[in-house]
Amino acid sequence: MNNNTMRMRRLRQKNFLRLLLSETNFTLDDLIYPLFVTHGRGLRQEIDSMPGIYHISLDNLISEVDEIARLNIKAVMLFGIPESKSDVGMEAYDNGGIIQESIRVIKQTIPDIVIITDVCLCQYTTHGHCGIVHNNVVDNDASLEILGKIAVSQAEAGSDIIAPSSMMDMQVLSIRDTLDLAGFKDIPIMSYSAKYSSSFYGPFRSAVDSSPQFGDRNSYQINPANAKEAIREIELDINQGTDLIMVKPALSYLDIISLAQQKFDYPLAAFNTSGEYSMVKSASLKGWIDEKKMVYEIITSIKRAGANMIISYHAKDIASWFNNELD
């Protein structure tokens, strides 16, 4: 027997060695926490499909964001539930819309937290699609003007990063041009560049009442069977001027995250979606899993695949665990 044969277990015997030799680590600076903001007063209502996640009214928003900031989470992503819907999603770009008001409330009291705002139409429209609909068909080019109006209204309210998610062709170029013309050349765009037509969005759609009222989103979101198509989408967004790229969902698309990281020298976000969150949380509530260990493993795998930042509903739990460990 060769005495020089490497025994890999030597480096796993002691906890300090395992920690010292850890190849992948994530910190709270890597995490972005999504928030659901709604009209009304005194609301902090748990979402049935997403245990531990809440609809929050504007008057409770500050206490929520203050808690997030105290947990050392540096960024939030806002999703709004409108007071009313219309065919063209008017509240999405209304100066007094729920997202615009939320941005102002946060910036007036907790200005240092980074606000990322989703640019889409699905929860604001009567039909539930991510663009303008004509004759039961999503009209790509007609949607671009509305998406630009949403982006500008959010930037005027104080959004730090604009995140278009509707997957309309040329949306990044159109939004970049519109922002620049409105005087917002310094506002970055985080594009949902590779957004798949996924079953992992179910709890989110329930939370914001955004399920399509006819058809589906297969004509504008990516086929889950395709990887090369996602890379082409990312490349197009980069060529159109996006500042950050995103892959959504995360867990079933770790290969796409890895491919994107290898091919593009761009900041890369991954969205750990509502369905991914709810599966873990539900199993934890049943006592079937060790939630903390599983969440750490999931977030580590997303980071290992190549994500620079991770949007996750687990972020507050992770921050609480981190802070307790430091104590």
Image (cartoon, helix red, strand yellow):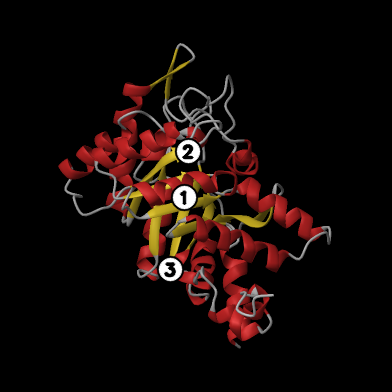
Amino acid type, callout 1 = Ser
- Where residue 284 appears, x then y in whole percent? 77, 60
Determine which quarter of the picture holds residue 17.
bottom right
Mark 2 neighbour class, 10 Å CA radius: few under 14, some 14 to 19, many 20 or more: many
Inter-mark Cα distance, 2 to 3: 24 Å
Residue at numbered disc 2: 195
Q: Residue at x 47, y 38 (%)?
A: 195
Image location of residue 117, percent across then percent down:
40, 50
Q: Give the residue type that dot 3 points to.
A: Lys
Q: Quadrant of the C terminus?
A: bottom right
- Residue sticking out furthest to the top: 135
Q: Tell me if residue 199 comes above or below residue 17 in the rendering.
A: above
Distance from label 3 to label 1 (Cα)?
Answer: 25 Å
Name the residue furthest bottom. 327
Q: With respect to residue 290, does 209 lie above or below?
A: above
Residue drawn at 66 percent across, 77 percent down: 12
Q: Nearer the viewer, mark 2 or mark 1?
A: 1
Where is residue 177, by image quadrant? top left
Task: State the mark number for residue 74.
Answer: 3
In the rendered image, the residue lying farthest to the front is 1
Determine crowd level at label 1: few under 14, some 14-19, many 20+ residues with C-alpha closer than 10 A: some
In this rendering, the answer to whether 276 lies above or below 215 is below
**Residue 4 at what x, y percent from top left?**
60, 78
**Residue 323 — which label?**
none
Which numbered disc, 2 or 3, marks the residue closer to the eye? 2
Q: Secondary structure at mark 1?
A: helix
Could you say whether the residue bearing mark 2 is in a helix, strand or loop? strand
At 49% from the left edge and 71% from the top edge, which residue is drawn? Answer: 27
